[in-house]
């Protein structure tokens, strides 16, 4: 194909949109659609090459096609992988190296999009900081498309009288199926929809369809094509400016930037007054030629730079990193990308290219393995004793009151009335922190015998994550998730999101000891409060939570649940405004929930939320091993205090127990992240399973006798 200046300029607009979006420039929150623009361009270009080759020579050389792809894509991508690994060892938190090693290995064989899609289906993993090579997902999708598309065109065009028509029909089928999958899966499986080839192929397919019928499309008048081209530019611009509020992407909404790109390509570089007027200017041509290098280098530079600074990047720091990106990209283009791509020796000898490609793939695999085996030294030379104190300084209220099962005003008649002892609701207003927590306030150094270790902290979770009883993106409960004493006469349930799930280990241990049946009813991102939550990490409304909550209620009634422990993250967001669920919503919803549960014969017990550290604790203290106090959550925000006040009022009014873990875990609003040799938090805001095991006697003392007495009074 001849050099297309309009395509070069369009590449420039796409990469500029992505860079501005990632660097947080206002007004570009939809800049991620630049990737969709690249997909359409790729489909158009490779299909043009393949179709033209078939028409002009009567054959398609897969050897030459894949040789071109290797020369074009692999050199820079391999160099960036190796450079990222080296930089990560020097400047990235050690806790992130294990996942990065896995990512690099997958990226080298063009499958990292599967890693990110699967990671996105895990509520906890989706909250992890982004991988320095997360942008490789789009390269993986393109490579997978290339693997299939060239072979498919070569196969379907064999013996065809009208090759373009047959290939076009095949593309139409692919586009329809892929677009349908994109629309349906963006709501039900947003992570797989975003990262998957099956839901992105239609974007490349539309570019390919234009390539097949490009000659016919050029019969449209130049003036009309110019108008279509400008409409396409406007569509892309609107997407960049407004798509930050799109909840489910790609889905049907992606048709706007995709068709916009098709429109610009249709206009071509020969329509007077068309987009080429802008796209053809020298700065955009320069950026477009280096767009691939810019895309490959910008993300690891930004992510590792942010980790090195250790805080949110300011404007000056972002500008410095952006200039670094441009400089490194220009060098990579001049000394790696272009020389290899244009090498006459490599063009003439594809066998050398395939050997080079194999070597580049191997370099990525070796880099991933080496990084996985790298054991960073995080020793401080300090060994701490395990904390032993697990008794609250003040025992929660446990006194009982007399309760009559029949109303009577006659003293004589009372001799026939059944009287039961009903325990008063648990109140922790006068409960102080554990002594070990008080002692830990002064701790500033990470002990070498920390449990769990910093490198394994993210996996320190209760068993319900491993056996899939903690759910994600489900509309119905899993009925077989029954723990404790499965033959027990008392049935209790744990209901809520991941902040409920973090208490499972303690409750399961107590349930076994006291012969309770325990129902595990937890799902990531799904609160028990009747609200449709908005998930920031997946950028989607969790509409499935409503159906799941109904399923929970039916299941608890069916199983004869006596007591339900309610817990959820105060940081959940409401889909109505995408802000944190406000105290007034709790005030409206909570009393009605208590009443409806009691109608079902289920007594609620509220668990307040645990402290919410701002950074990921393992990462924070790995970077501040002798000043870990800076990583500790301190006084709660006004929003948290307001929610606690509402819950406290609602539980007191309804005579419902309210357990407040913060009163155990914080001293004077300072909440240590290390207690003795125990790491308190495994990530941004979840307790480690190790600290929950340590807290189990405290939880048992608070809940055990109360639940037994409560059930006895009901019976």
Image (cartoon, rainbow, N blue to C red):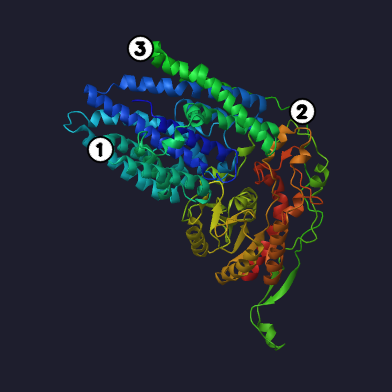
For mark 1, what is the residue?
Answer: 216
Q: Quadrant of residue 271?
A: top left
Graded by Cα atoms within 10 Å as few (under 14), some (14 to 19) or many (20 or more), the crowding at tag 3 reads few
Q: Is residue 4 visible?
A: yes
State the residue at coordinates (48%, 25%).
Answer: 108
Mark 3 vs mark 1, CA separation in Å: 34 Å
Graded by Cα atoms within 10 Å as few (under 14), some (14 to 19) or many (20 or more), the crowding at tag 1 reads few
Badge 2 element:
loop
Q: Is residue 365 visible?
A: no
Q: Percent from the top left, x then y, of residue 324?
A: 62, 27
In this rendering, position of residue 104 left or right of residue 643: left
Q: Is residue 245 above or below residue 645?
A: above
Q: Percent from the top left, x then y, of residue 364?
A: 51, 22
Number of numbered markers: 3
For mark 2, what is the residue?
Answer: 380
Badge 3 element:
helix
Mark with earlier residue (2, 1): 1
């Amino acid at each position: 194909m001849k050099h297309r200046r309009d395509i070069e300029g369009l590449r420039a607009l796409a990469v500029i949109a992505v860079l501005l979006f990632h660097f947080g420039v206002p007004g570009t929150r939809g800049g991620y659609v630049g990737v969709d623009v690249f997909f359409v361009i790729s489909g158009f270009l490779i299909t043009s090459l393949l179709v033209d080759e078939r028409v002009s020579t009567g054959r398609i050389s897969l050897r030459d096609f894949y040789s071109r792809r290797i020369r074009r894509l692999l050199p820079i991508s391999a160099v960036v992988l190796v450079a990222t690994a080296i930089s990560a060892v020097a400047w990235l938190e050690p806790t992130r190296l294990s996942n990065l090693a896995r990512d690099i290995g997958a990226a080298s064989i063009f499958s990292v999009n599967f890693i990110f899609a699967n990671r996105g289906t895990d509520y906890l993993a989706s909250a992890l900081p982004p991988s320095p090579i997360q942008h490789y997902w789009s390269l993986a999708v393109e490579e997978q498309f290339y693997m299939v598309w060239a072979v498919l065109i070569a196969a379907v065009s064999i013996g065809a009288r009208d090759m373009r028509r047959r290939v076009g029909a095949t593309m139409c089928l692919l586009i329809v199926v892929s677009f349908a999958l994109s629309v349906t899966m963006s709501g039900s499986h947003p992570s797989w929809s975003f990262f998957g080839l099956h839901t992105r192929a239609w974007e490349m397919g539309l570019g390919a369809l234009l390539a097949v019928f490009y000659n016919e499309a050029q019969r449209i008048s130049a003036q009309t094509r110019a108008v279509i081209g400008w409409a396409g530019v406007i569509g892309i611009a609107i997407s960049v400016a407004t798509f930050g509020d799109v909840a489910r992407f790609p889905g049907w909404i992606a048709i706007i930037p995709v068709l916009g790109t098709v429109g610009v390509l249709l206009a071509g570089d020969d329509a007077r007054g068309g987009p080429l007027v802008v796209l053809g200017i020298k700065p955009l041509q320069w950026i477009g030629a280096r767009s691939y290098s810019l895309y490959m280098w910008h993300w690891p530079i930004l992510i590792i730079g942010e980790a090195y600074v250790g805080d949110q990047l300011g404007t000056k720091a972002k500008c410095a990193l952006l200039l670094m990106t441009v400089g490194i990209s220009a060098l990579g283009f001049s000394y790696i990308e272009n020389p290899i791509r244009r090498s006459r020796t490599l063009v003439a000898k594809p066998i050398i290219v395939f050997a080079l490609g194999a070597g580049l793939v191997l370099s990525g695999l070796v880099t991933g393995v080496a990084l996985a085996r790298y054991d960073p030294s995080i020793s401080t030379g300090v060994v701490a004793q395990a904390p032993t104190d697990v008794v609250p300084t003040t025992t929660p209220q446990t006194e009982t009151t007399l309760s009559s099962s029949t109303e009577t005003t006659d003293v004589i008649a009372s001799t026939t009335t059944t009287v039961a002892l009903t325990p008063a609701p648990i109140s922790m207003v006068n409960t102080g922190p554990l002594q070990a927590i008080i002692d830990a306030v002064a701790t500033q150094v990470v002990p070498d015998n920390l449990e769990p270790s910093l490198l394994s902290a993210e996996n320190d979770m209760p068993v319900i994550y491993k056996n899939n009883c903690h759910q994600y993106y489900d509309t119905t409960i899993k009925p077989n998730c029954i723990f404790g004493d499965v033959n027990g006469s008392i049935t209790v349930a744990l209901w809520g999101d991941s902040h409920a799930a973090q208490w499972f280990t303690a409750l399961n241990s107590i349930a076994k000891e006291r012969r309770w049946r325990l129902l595990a009813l937890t799902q990531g991102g799904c609160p028990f409060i009747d609200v449709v939550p908005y998930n920031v990490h997946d950028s989607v409304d969790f509409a499935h939570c409503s159906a799941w909550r109904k399923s929970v209620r039916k299941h608890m009634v069916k199983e004869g649940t006596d007591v339900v422990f309610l817990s959820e993250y105060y940081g959940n967001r409401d889909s109505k405004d995408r802000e944190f669920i406000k105290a007034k919503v709790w005030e409206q919803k909570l009393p009605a929930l208590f009443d409806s549960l009691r109608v079902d014969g289920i007594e609620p017990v509220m668990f307040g939320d645990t402290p919410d550290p701002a950074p990921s604790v393992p990462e924070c203290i790995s970077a501040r091993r002798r000043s870990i106090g800076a990583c500790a959550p301190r006084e709660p925000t006004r929003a948290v205090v307001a929610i606690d006040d509402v819950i406290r009022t609602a539980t007191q009014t309804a005579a419902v127990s309210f357990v407040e873990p913060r009163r155990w875990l914080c001293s004077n609003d300072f909440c240590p992240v290390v207690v003795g040799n125990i790491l308190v938090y495994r990530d941004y805001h979840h307790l480690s399973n190790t600290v929950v095991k340590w807290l189990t006697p405290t939880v048992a003392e608070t809940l055990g006798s109360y639940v037994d007495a409560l059930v006895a009074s009901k019976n």
